[in-house]
Image (cartoon, rainbow, N blue to C red):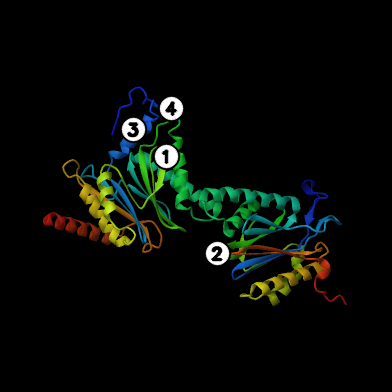
Amino acid sequence: MAEEHGREGEHMTGTSIIAVAFDGGVVLGADSRTTTGSLIANRVTNKIQPVADNIFCCRSGSSADTETIADYVTYILKIHCSETGDAPTVHTASTLFRQLCYQNKQLLANIICAGWDEIDGGSVYTVPLGGTLVKAPYAIGGSGSTYIFGYCDAHYKPGMTREETLDFVTKALTFMMARDGSSGGLIRTVVVDKDGVHRSMIPGDKLFRVWVG
Amino acid sequence: MSSIGTGYDLSCTTYSPDGRVFQVEYATKAVDNSGTAVGIKVKDGVVMGVEKLVMSKMLEPGSSRRIFTVDEHIGVAVAGLSADGRHLVKRCRSDAVDYRDFYQDSIPVHVLTDRISSYVQAYTLYSELRPFGCSLLIAGWDVKGPRLFMVEPSGISWGYFGCAIGKGRQACKTEIEKLNLKEMTCREAITEIAKIIEMVHDDSKDKTYELELSWVCEESQHKHTLVPAELREQAIKSAKAALEDEAMTE
């Protein structure tokens, strides 16, 4: 499929992304590996991109497609907010992601949009390949996510604190990166709450050791 | 107040030496000749009332509406050329539903007002189009609470606590200014509006009128609807009684 439409040799974010809402905000997390075939084109990628001061998205799929979509959403959101005079909401940003993904089905994009706004507090929306929009307490995406559905089912619980949520995100990403060849590098996290944004990074060699036998 | 702009008033594309566009001002005259429309924004919502002059006894009551619902949460009252008003209402409805389709959210009242004002203003730019001969009162409920706006033929719009358009507007404005809008509820507002319209209606000049009343408030679950029939009848009765009392004490 990568060979269609001149996508041969395209940068792909075979990826591990996750976003979890807690009472008062959200935590977004991602790995940092971008691959072109078997070459790791970028081992320190930032896959968590802001579309507004209080709203971020985790990108997975084609790098070019997701970067462009996120840029369009940033642009449309800015104009929309200057017309309404109100701060952007996660709902509106996610709806814009969905419109772009649904109306342009040739795009390869699996995007998680999360942030904090005054109306809904912390919220997480996911826009998978076809362009549906799903609001959920947490979302995982990318090639690495397939390995941790069971882990998330077992370990996610509603009502976690900010610290517990950060810990859950970090552990989930570690497990994703341990089994998925297209994910790796370091872990980037972004915490968004009413007081602002806090970005963090954990280098690959500082992650807890997964049992390797 | 009125002046004739002889020579400078033939088209929208001509300014007068004192910087006026007379065609737009003449459009406003069409509004000033129509039956009064009043809107007031109170503690728990917005109420609008229209003095709908009955042109003939043959007319079915409730026909020839002047208040329209343009989206669940927004209503529009028209004064002026009613056909122009109908066109603008159609445009409002289309804007509201397109916004909802794209943003998956109801259109904020001030955004709809801005868009319709821009549309109205566009018709003041060309000599081949005439400006709209109607003003709109736009009442709605969005995240900011109850909102009331007025758009005039020039495309200017303002947000209001209380507003009146049409032939009785000066008298209405005087009455509205006497009211304590911040403390009033919608149920009280209905009676006040019925009273104000009854007061400004000129029996000698005009025939009978039908009172069209609508609201968007807590009680209507933030939806714009015509005021329920029993409440309307009650308001009209109370209004007439209150006016008789006042007449007797004078």
Q: Residue at x 48, y 47 (%)?
A: B95
Q: On residue B26, which mark appears?
A: 3
The picture places residue B23, in percent across and down from the top left corner, at 37, 30
Disc 2 marks which residue? A120
Q: Which residue is situated farthest in the top direction here?
A: B7
| Residue B28 drawn above or below residue A206 | above
Neighbour tally class for label 3: few under 14, some 14-19, many 20 plus, Cα within 10 Å: some
Query: What is the number of callouts on the image?
Result: 4
Q: On residue B13, which mark appears?
A: 4
> Is residue A78 found left or right of B142 in the rendered image?
right
The picture places residue B147, in percent across and down from the top left corner, at 40, 54
Q: What residue type is labelled 2?
A: Asp
Q: Which residue is situated farthest in the right direction here?
A: A213
| Residue A178 drawn above or below residue B213 | below
Disc 1 marks which residue? B155
Q: What residue type is labelled 1?
A: Gly
The picture places residue B10, in percent across and down from the top left corner, at 37, 25
Neighbour tally class for label 2: few under 14, some 14-19, many 20 plus, Cα within 10 Å: few
> Is residue B152 found left or right of A196 in the rendered image?
left
Q: Mark 2 lies on which chain?
A: A
Q: Do the residues under discs 2 and 1 have CB atoms within 8 angstroms?
A: no
Name the foreground residue: B71 vs B116: B116
Q: Which quadrant of the view contains residue A156? A: bottom right
Q: What residue type is labelled 4?
A: Thr
Q: Distance between the residues labelled 4 and 2?
A: 49 Å
Q: Which of marks 4 and 3 is nearer the N terminus?
A: 4
The picture places residue B197, in percent across and down from the top left corner, at 24, 50
Q: Which amino acid does label 3 sit on?
A: Tyr
Q: Residue at x 15, y 56 (%)?
A: B246
Q: How far apart are marks 1 and 3 (CA)?
A: 14 Å
Q: Mark 3 lies on which chain?
A: B
